Image (cartoon, rainbow, N blue to C red):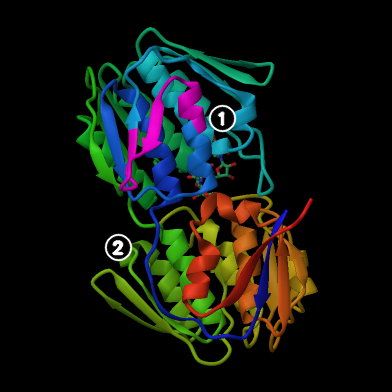
Amino acid sequence: MTRYIIQGGIPLSGEIKLSGAKNAALKMMAASILTSDISVLKNVPSIKDVDTMIQVLEFLGVSASFNPDGDLHIDAAGDLSDKAPYELVSQMRASIIVLGPLLARLGRAHVALPGGCNIGSRQIDLHLGGLKALGAKITTGHGYIEGECSDLKGTIVTLDFPSVGATENLLMAAVLAKGTTVIENAAREPEVTDLVLFLNKMGGRISGEDTAVLTIEGVDSLHGAVHEIMPDRIEAGTMLIAAAMTNGSIQVDPGHAEHLGIVLEKLSLTGADLSVANSTIRLTTKGRPAALDVSTLPYPGFPTDLQPMIAAYLSCAEGISILTENVFENRFMYIDELNRMGADIRLDGHHAIIKGVKSLSGAPVRAPDLRAGAALILAGLGAEGETIVEDVGHIERGYEGLEEKLRYLGADIVKEEAVC
Ligand code: EPZ
């Protein structure tokens, strides 16, 4: 297993260039199935999850390859298969996002059930219920979802929960349906908006982006499009909190500073000095953060994907913070590892009560999942002494060149491939 070796206590400083957003890129790669034309995606991050999605597309008969200037060309012209196999879907549960496009393009789909992961059971009932409302016949059995439909028909779908993936699967099914679909209580994440922008460039007729009500007028066909993936706002938040943890000073440009509105508000409440010019954010911190309470919620609430990072930061706050996780049922797997570094955090249901300590001490720890792993790296950057983070393969699924970027900002972090 690959590990990072970190010497803590060095303030990070400088300006960092963000990569394209993982949670936007994966969906647009799936959306390219909707046309037999070629589509080109720019600013696609070079991460393991993108490689896995390329394998899924190729298994479907779609060709996807990076050209010399790093743009991803996707050509879904051929006769496509309708099968997304277990061995690929089990590597990356986001593969479920090909379900809607396959039903829209082929009228059939055979997609492995994604199953849960470390942070929760990751249900897909809202995906399947919405697709049935659009007229798809959906059955599950032997670990697979079987879908078929002669024609998808526009309808009104009200989501019990503003699920990002369900909103996106339904968008990509409805865009070629007969008639108009309205998705109520839709997810409002910026990555959903980026997908809407791409689908409309392809000839889709979708309105209501950035709101909880999306209206999709079905069209007969879509054509290829060129689209630049939005910068990764979760990477931006990760870097800002990394700087805050080391009493550093950095600058990031997430393209839309407002996408991090509540994150910036919380960081300034801890005492960080923040300035925003256009879409560029500069953060400087001095001394320990003030304690505060944080609750994760669907966008525009505090993003669950930054929950482990803010916990690491608040573990050295002056006072007691209460962190509440409202989106996933099991997103505190990293707390034991933080406590092994000297943090004083107690779990009570979906709350983490964080009693701030003066500083963390470096220790060997293990990354349980992508964002928790990133939080442990941040904890090591702020801790006294050496931290070894094991199992960083999780982290490399979702962050492009994280250790190089942190080294560029002054961190003492080295990757070591463990000899098996
Ligand atoms: C997306 O996951 C992101 N992943 C997640 O980022 C992110 O945490 C999440 O949205 C919330 O913002 C990608 O975009 C690839 P949801 P998704 O459907 O679509 C429940 C990361 O680290 N739910 O909004 O799976 C579900 O169980 C990842 O980059 C149902 O009950 O999130 C969960 O508790 C982690 N039934 C909650 O909703 C459903 O049919 C949020 O899920 C669907 C979801």
10 Å neighbourhood of mark 1: few (<14), some, or many (≥20)?
A: few
Q: Residue at x 22, y 17 (%)?
A: 220
Q: Which disc number belongs to residue 256? A: 2
- Above or below: residue 37 compared with residue 235: above
Q: Residue at x 67, y 21 (%)?
A: 143
In the image, what residue type sits under mark 2?
His
Provide the secondary structure element on which disc 2 rests. Answer: loop
60 displayed left or right of 382: left
- Residue holding disc 1: 125
The answer to if 102 sits in the magenta stretch is: no
- Above or below: residue 399 compared with residue 227: below
The tally of labels here is 2
Cβ of disc 1 within 8 Å of ligand 1? yes
92 displayed left or right of 303: right
Q: Which residues are magenta?
A: 55-73
Q: Residue at x 23, y 19 (%)?
A: 221
